[in-house]
Image (spheres, grey):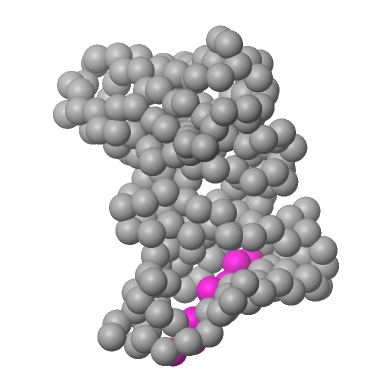
Amino acid sequence: GAGVSQSPRYKVTKRGQDVALRCDPISGHVSLYWYRQALGQGPEFLTYFNYEAQQDKSGLPNDRFSAERPEGSISTLTIQRTEQRDSAMYRCASSLVGGGTDTQYFGPGTRLTVL
Amino acid sequence: GQQVMQIPQYQHVQEGEDFTTYCNSSTTLSNIQWYKQRPGGHPVFLIQLVKSGEVKKQKRLTFQFGEAKKNSSLHITATQTTDVGTYFCCTGGGNKLTFGTGTQLKVEL
């Protein structure tokens, strides 16, 4: 079936605006993860869901960042009052059952640019 | 939290040469996973190692997990242009992956 999809693929916004990034995981995958990847770096963990429950949000940089997965499928990462330092590639991944050693499948990412 | 360091940061090789990237941690790791990210692409899972001293092979790729479970290596024999990309090691704990800094491989004809 289809892999992880993310939308939009590119988002340009002005400083101070709110943005919502969407992730559609692989059908049937229980766990969903959000990462942020700076240019030339590896992905950095932001938050993680099992079904609709947010299990770990320790990687969210500050309270301007939030995420939800209300029906245990599609997830939205929201950044309020964006700042230039928020510019990065935001990646979503999903795995079948989670557990730390389960294979995570990454989506194509959303490239966020804050002007 | 756990951190993993990778060396080298960049590697240029001629097609047909071998390539090795190393991943090191100051703490014992429960597992090591390797991902490959092509230019402009997303990380793609290659393999997972969990046992001390484990060695796994995928065609021209050989993955090793150190005896002390603090280091790992990925070796590519006779590189091809299709091997171009950034190779990341990472470790999973508590459902989040901690990625290394990656090794960017360029292969020249």
Q: Viewer-proximal residue, A28 or B100?
A: A28
Question: How many marks can you see?
Answer: 0
Q: Residue A36, can we see it?
A: no
Identify the main secondary structure in magenta.
strand
Q: Which span is picked out in magenta?
A: B17-24
Q: Quadrant of residue A90?
A: top left
Q: Residue furthest top?
A: A70
* Residue A60 x, y percent position in the rendering: 51, 27
* Residue A30 x, y percent position in the rendering: 66, 27
B72 is within the stretch colored magenta: no
The correct choice, above or below, for A68 with respect to A36 in the image is above
Residue at 38% over, 59% down: B38
* Residue A82 x, y percent position in the rendering: 29, 21
Residue at 77% over, 65% down: B69
Direction from residue B61 to residue A7 in the image, left or right:
left
Q: Viewer-proximal residue, A114 or A76?
A: A76
The correct choice, above or below, for A63 with respect to B59 in the image is above
Q: Viewer-proximal residue, B48 or A96?
A: A96
* Residue B65 x, y percent position in the rendering: 73, 69
Direction from residue A97 to residue A76 in the image, left or right:
left
